[in-house]
Structure formats: structure tokens, C-alpha cells
Amino acid sequence: MFGFLIGSACLAGLAMMAARGRRHGFYRHGFGGHGCHGNHHQGPGGGFGRRMMYRVLDRLDTSPGQDKAILGAIDDLRDSAASARRDLPDLKKQVAEALRAETFDEHAFQAIFDEPLGRLNKLRDELTRTAATIHETLTPKQRDRLYDLVQSSTRWGYGHAF
């Protein structure tokens, strides 16, 4: 049971991070139709997530068409992540109220998580579709590079690989 809860918490954390990325400018400069691989303008909405994504796409040596497909898939994932985050503060309140009650109702407590877990399952499915899109978009050589980047990164986003 604890493994399931820890796994769910990790997935929820991923969803929150992905949803947060939209607010911090995740789009590549060339994605809107102006710009190129080597010129990464830091205009409005730029930030660490955006720079990291540029670096990954540059290291993979992706074409503009691949960039568009990958970034579109990631954008869809962000929408799902934002949906998965919805009402999480209410969940915290419901858990606190259940723990404060005179008697503990196991079934009612478990039911608190039904809807959020359903959203997490949808997020998992969207993450799978995103990974499949990225996999199909990349060439075998680019997939090898991505494997190397993921394997060599000790801390996601802060490691030396990116």
C-alpha cells in the first residue's frame, strides 16, 4: 500500500512540475515559425525549463519538424498535468478532515483518492502517448543520444548532461 502511495505521490509531483513548466515558458523560439536551432532568444516567458529543452533538442540535433512534433506532444502533456493538479488543495483538506473525525472511516478515506487517482491514470496515459510520439519522431541515432542524455544525468534538469 505504501509503495502505491509513494508512486502516486511521485506521479503527482511530475504532473505538478509539468504543469508549472507552461507558466515558465517551455516553448522553443523557433516553434512559432521564427528562429533557428542556434539562436535561442530569451524573450518573455523564457527561463530554465525553456533553456533546458533547447539544449536537449540541440543535443539531439532535431529538425524543425521534429521540434514541432515533440513540443506539441509535451504541450498536450502539460494540459493533462494541469488537469491532474486540479483540486489537490481540496484533497489535502479532505484528508485532514478525515483524520480529525471522531471515528476513522477507511472506505470514506480511500474514496477521497478515487477521483485524483483517476486523473493520475489519465496523466500516465498521456505521458505514455508523449513518450511514444517522441520515440516515433526521433531517428535511431537521436534515440541513442537521448538514452545517453537520460542515463548520464544524475539530477534531472541540473545534471551535466543537459
Image (cartoon, rainbow, N blue to C red):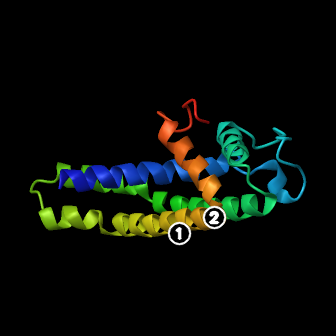
Image spot of residue 10 (x, y percent): 37, 49
Give the residue type that dot 1 points to.
Answer: Arg
- In front here: 110 or 50? 50
Q: Which residue is mark 1?
A: 129
Q: Quadrant of the N terminus?
A: bottom left
Q: Quadrant of the C terminus?
A: top right
Provide the secondary structure element on which disc 1 rests.
helix
Provide the secondary structure element on which disc 2 rests.
helix
Image spot of residue 155 (x, y percent): 48, 34
Give the residue type that dot 2 points to.
Answer: Ala
> Which numbered dot is residue 73?
2
At horizontal 35% and vertical 56% (from top left) the residue drawn is 91
- In front here: 9 or 92? 9
Upstream in sequence: badge 1 or badge 2: 2
At horizontal 90% and vertical 54% (from top left) the residue drawn is 34
At horizontal 11% and vertical 57% (from top left) the residue drawn is 104
Image spot of residue 93 (x, y percent): 33, 52
- Estimate the spatial distance between the alpha carbons at disc 1 and disc 2, rounded to whole Å: 8 Å
Q: Are marks 1 and 2 in contact (CB under 8 Å)?
A: yes
